[in-house]
Amino acid sequence: MQDVAVLIVGGGPVGLTASILLSQAGVRSLLVERHPGTAVHPKARGINARSMEMYRQCGVEAAIRQAGLPPERAGFIVWAHTLAGEEIERRVPWRSGPQSTAASPVRNCLCAQDDLEPVLRRFAEQQPGGELRFSTEVTACEQDDAAVTATLVDRASGRQRQVRARYVIAADGAQSSVRQQLGVRMLGEEDVYDSVNILLNADLRPWTLHRPAALYFIEHPKMRATFLTINGIDRWGFLVNSLAAYGYKASDFTAERSAELVRMAAGVADLDVKILGIAPWTASARVAERYRLGRIFLAGDAAHEMPPTGGFGMNTGVQDVHNLAWKLAAVIRGAASERLLDTYHDERQPLGRAITQQSLANAISMGRLNRTTERAGARPEYLNEQGMIFGAAYESSAVVPDGTAPPIVANPVTDYVPSARPGGRAPHAWLARNGERLSTIDLLGNGFVLLTTRAGQTWREAAQRLGIGAFSIGDGELTDSDGQWTEAYGLDATGAVLVRPDGYVGWRSRAMTADPRASLGEAMTRIMGYA
């Protein structure tokens, strides 16, 4: 029987990202995926800036961008009666606009899932300690006080084997067999609307090249549909929503009928269309009641099913494992108590519920749940959710409160105010090192990091004695190029901030304390679940 520290069930973006993060944290893992290879359908496409910050820290950002589309080739969102017909509305989403650079040094990226997964797989296979097996299915998981025993079946040969893992990450999708074996209750609404994804070849440049968009929403009397940009030339996704409301069934979508509907939505009767794939699916808006059950953790679609309106499903999933991986690594190394692992549910489940609710609100505003003769449009928050992307604030025992109030925002979905209040994402601020510009985001990585001022050298020395990475900003090596970092982090001339490996603030002291080493040590003790 093989022994591993962590078994990852599922080889989509969430599972592959978990493999990368665990390897970089020094944890051996085994990833198993029941399909023979990576995705063959585009599925998810939009990777938001917060997720790209994570991939930047992993060292895989450049490869993802190379596999995806440059921002200027998908900068709009367009509504039209048909692709060749009257345009109804055009928007530039906040996340694609220049104002997004004030919140992050990293831009979002449009990279279809069937282009993204090979990049992540290649990178995961290059990491020491990460093993990947495709065409392998998990048929049972039994846990005891020490580990989980999983039964694996090779789908090609039918051969069974068992693996014993200290922990399991179930990232096996919306129909998660692991979740079903555990009997986890899902909270929310199931089957809120039905859809079909169609992958096709057609040259749509005559109607798209002058207005490059990520999404072309079609408001046609006979259907509600969307053209989804993949390469912006001849490879496109075509999404038909609300099938039952418009009198369609999934079985109606033969290749011939699908091509007819594509031509109808394009408004081009003689369009040359080749159908490459047809995938019916049903949107739900529900979240697992528990993300942790003993030694098994739910992540991604196994933990939360949400409508794709807003593009938060995959992003929420990869950020789930960003939150979880460092905690597992700390416990496996013996640097943290098992209690730290409870904070995964405490931090991610409430956020998963909030994001799922907002994704459903987007879908409702766009008429996805019914048929209407009126134009559906979309609420103003749609694709302008900077508050949801950057403004999440955790409350758990892995966060040490400092008594400050959260930032006041008019709309928590759209509005983001940078804040280093414990529990929030460490804000972006521009710095300089050896004449080169870099962000505070670039100082963060796999371990804890202490950020302090030039006058806070005692904090830095205390952190180094505790084995924590530390930077003094303004000490000559690192300078505050815009003069904004202490304001963004809410510090006076001698303050310090402790940032967790997932980029969220775990503790802050706005000024020097009488015993910095004791203060920092006490903070780490609390965060790691020993207090």
Image: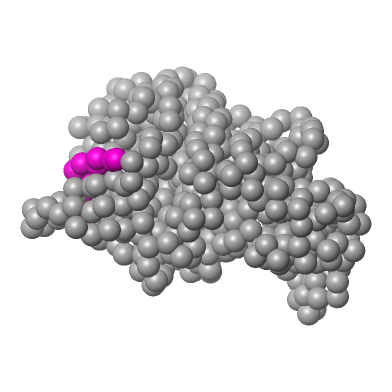
The residue lying at 19 percent from left, 43 percent from top is 139
> In the depicted view, which residue is nearer to us: 372 or 99?
99
Residue 123 visible somewhere in the drawing? yes
Tell me where residue 167 appears, x and y as whole percent: 36, 48
Is 297 or 200 nearer to us in this picture? 297
Against 146, residue 349 (above or below) is above
Is residue 239 magenta-colored? no
Q: At 76% from the left edge and 57% from the top edge, which residue is drawn?
A: 517
Coloring scheme used: one colour
Q: Is residue 29 left or right of residue 434?
A: left
Q: Nearer the viewer, residue 370 or 40?
A: 40
Residue at screen point 70% across, 48% down: 522
Left or right, 379 with reference to 101? left
Q: Is residue 505 left or right of residue 515?
A: left
Query: Is the stretch drawn in magenta largely helix, strand or loop?
Result: strand
Q: Is residue 139 magenta?
A: yes
Q: Residue at x 67, y 62 (%)?
A: 466
Q: Can you give x and y, in whole percent of width and height, for residue 521 in the image?
A: 70, 53
Residue 346 sits in quarter = top right
Q: x, y (%) of residue 404?
A: 80, 36
Could you say which is closer to the camera, residue 344 or residue 480?
A: 344
Quadrant placement of the C terminus: top right
Task: Establish if 258 lies above or below 16.
Answer: above
Q: Quadrant of residue 369?
A: top left
Locate the N terminus by quadrant. Answer: bottom left
Q: Which residues are magenta?
A: 135-144
